[in-house]
């Protein structure tokens, strides 16, 4: 807290206020700023190491340059990385699309609905999301094998959607709870239906919640290794996390290729966050009720 001190003045002179003492506050800010820099550096060190190793020549390389793109050229031209990248994008985008389309109306019902059915549905979602995925992997694999879905992108997409839908619904319900129901009531008075109020009021004001749900589903499907390892068998069906293991052999590991594929895996999430960061906003709903 800054304190202003009034100095004694002589008659006829203008009072002068002493400059407030802000040294403790500025010192505290600098400490917090330095701590944030330290934490950011610790977070970025592994990423810098991966990028650095991907740019170093491999053991079989004949180049003398300390920095080279040979590892990227090798994995993009001599391996199935592009196929794995396409598989990962297809599975991930399908998971995000289905999860958001299902979680948005389900979260609305969970937030606005009342009754035994809604309470039972809420309890069921809570139980489902508390169970780890590993518990259902083997039974699902046996079930999917009977339908011919054990080595297909469609089958693994179903698993990812089932894994994300419970948490995605809770995320949407929590965000819709923050939207005043008075906005919907005003729309109903103006003649809008329940579905019209949901589309025009809820969805328009739920963009940050929808993006958060989409990012959660994206990261879960994009980074998954365990489920893909169990379900996918053929090389042409691999996603990127499973394809990376093909560079690890019994007596030798191609670290340059592994780091190059890791850098390729980091690019889509980085682009996603960089693109959607501007659409996250807080406090935009409260102004809709101004003057009411």
Image: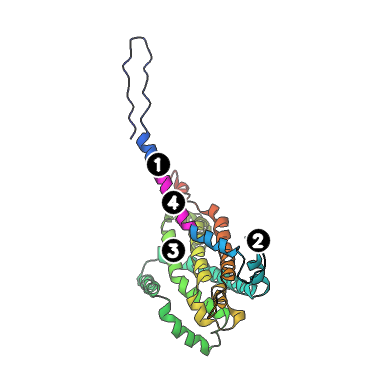
Q: Main secondary structure of the magenta part?
A: helix
- Left-right relation of 27 to 93: left
Say above or below: 4 vs 214: above
Q: Do the residues labelled 1 and 4 touch (CB within 8 Å)?
A: no
Residue drawn at (62%, 80%) of the image? 236
Taking the view exactly as shown, the residue that stands out farthest to the top is 12
Cα separation between marks 1 and 4:
14 Å
- Residue 196 visible here: no
Query: In front: mark 1 or mark 4?
Result: 4
Q: Residue at x 56, y 61 (%)?
A: 52
Q: Do callouts 4 and 3 mark residues in contact (Cβ within 8 Å)? A: no
- Is residue 32 found inside the magenta-colored segment of the image? yes
**Where residue 42 appears, x then y in whole percent?**
45, 56
Picture disc at residue 132: none
| Quadrant of res 256 | bottom right
Is the residue marked by circle 1 packed among few (<14), some (14-19), or many (20+) residues within 10 Å? Answer: few
What residue is shown with label 4? 38
User: What residue does disc 3 label?
Assistant: 171
* Residue identifier under label 2: 65
């Amino acid at each position: 807290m800054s304190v202003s001190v009034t100095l004694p003045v002589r008659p006829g002179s203008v009072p002068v206020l002493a400059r407030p003492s802000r040294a403790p506050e500025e010192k505290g800010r600098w400490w917090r700023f330095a701590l944030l820099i330290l934490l950011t550096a610790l977070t970025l060190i592994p990423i810098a190491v991966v990028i650095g190793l991907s740019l170093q020549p491999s053991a079989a390389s004949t180049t003398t340059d300390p920095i080279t793109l040979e590892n990227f050229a090798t994995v993009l031209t001599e391996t199935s990385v592009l196929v794995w990248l396409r598989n990962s994008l297809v599975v991930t985008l399908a998971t995000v699309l289905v999860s958001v389309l299902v979680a948005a109306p389900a979260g609305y019902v969970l937030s606005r609905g009342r009754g035994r059915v809604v309470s039972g549905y809420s309890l069921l979602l809570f139980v489902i999301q508390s169970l780890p995925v590993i518990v259902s992997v083997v039974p699902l694999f046996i079930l999917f094998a009977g339908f011919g879905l054990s080595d297909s992108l469609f089958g693994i997409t179903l698993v990812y959607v089932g894994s994300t839908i419970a948490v995605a619904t809770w995320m949407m319900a929590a965000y819709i709870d923050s939207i005043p129901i008075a906005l919907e009531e005003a729309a109903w008075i103006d003649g809008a239906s329940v579905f019209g109020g949901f589309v025009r009021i809820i969805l328009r004001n739920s963009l940050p919640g929808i993006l958060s749900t989409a990012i959660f589903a994206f990261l879960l499907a994009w980074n998954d290794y365990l489920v893909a390892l169990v379900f996918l068998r053929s090389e042409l069906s691999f996603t990127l996390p499973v394809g990376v293991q093909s560079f690890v052999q019994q007596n030798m590991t191609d670290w340059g290729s592994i780091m190059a594929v890791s850098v390729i895996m980091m690019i889509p999430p980085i682009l996603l966050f960089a693109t959607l960061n501007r659409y996250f906003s807080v406090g935009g709903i409260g102004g809709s009720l101004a003057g009411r």
